Amino acid sequence: MTTQSTILVSVFKTEPAKQAALIALLKQNTETVIRALHGWRATRLIAAQDGASVVIYSEWETPADIEAMRGDPRMKAYFPRIAELASLDSMMGPAVWSEAR
């Protein structure tokens, strides 16, 4: 039986000159911290073609897993570095509809 994922979507607003550095930092964070956390299932990074933003689409087992990630000291160590490159807005919830080919 497959359980419902909780989706976390984070939108990082940045300057085009900082987008590559932001992507590298987010990728490093995912590879060294996120993937080791309980409840993590998948992460996708989406880069805006104009360089002004990056979106993270992450799947987690539960909302509690997302909250635990946010409170993890290893994750908190990344927050100031991310803030130097971008502003952040995020939301989480269950996927309510999906279609694929």
Image (spheres, rainbow, N blue to C red):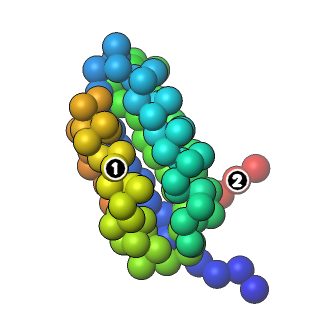
| Amino acid type assigned to the residue bearing label 1 in the image | Ala
Name, please, the residue furthest toward the bottom: 1
Measured as percent of width and height from the top left, residue 39 is found at 57, 72
Residue on which the image places disc 1? 77
Side (left or right) of 59 relative to 77:
right
| Amino acid type assigned to the residue bearing label 2 in the image | Ala
Side (left or right) of 89 relative to 27:
left
Q: Is residue 55 visible?
A: yes
Side (left or right) of 42 relative to 66:
right
Residue on which the image places disc 2? 100
Find residue 14 and report its image quarter.
top left
Question: Upstream in the sequence, badge 1 or badge 2?
Answer: 1
- Residue at figure coordinates x 45%, y 21% from the top left: 20
With respect to residue 83, does 79 lie above or below? below
With respect to residue 36, does 22 lie above or below? above
Mark 2 element type: loop
Measured as percent of width and height from the top left, residue 3 is found at 64, 81
Mark 1 element type: loop
Which of the two residues, 64 or 89, is positioned nearer the viewer here?
Answer: 64
For label 2, the crowd category at 10 Å Cα-Cα, with few meaning under 14, some 14 to 19 and many 20 or more, is few
Quadrant (top left/top right/bottom left/bottom right) for the N terminus: bottom right
Find residue 38 and report its image quarter.
bottom right
With respect to residue 101, does 7 lie above or below? below
Q: Is residue 5 visible?
A: no
Which of the two residues, 9 or 99, is positioned nearer the viewer here?
Answer: 9
Name, please, the residue furthest toward the top: 17
Q: Report the Cα–Cα distance between label 1 and label 2.
A: 36 Å
- Residue at figure coordinates x 49%, y 77% from the top left: 62
Measured as percent of width and height from the top left, residue 95 is found at 51, 68
- Residue at figure coordinates x 52%, y 56% from the top left: 34
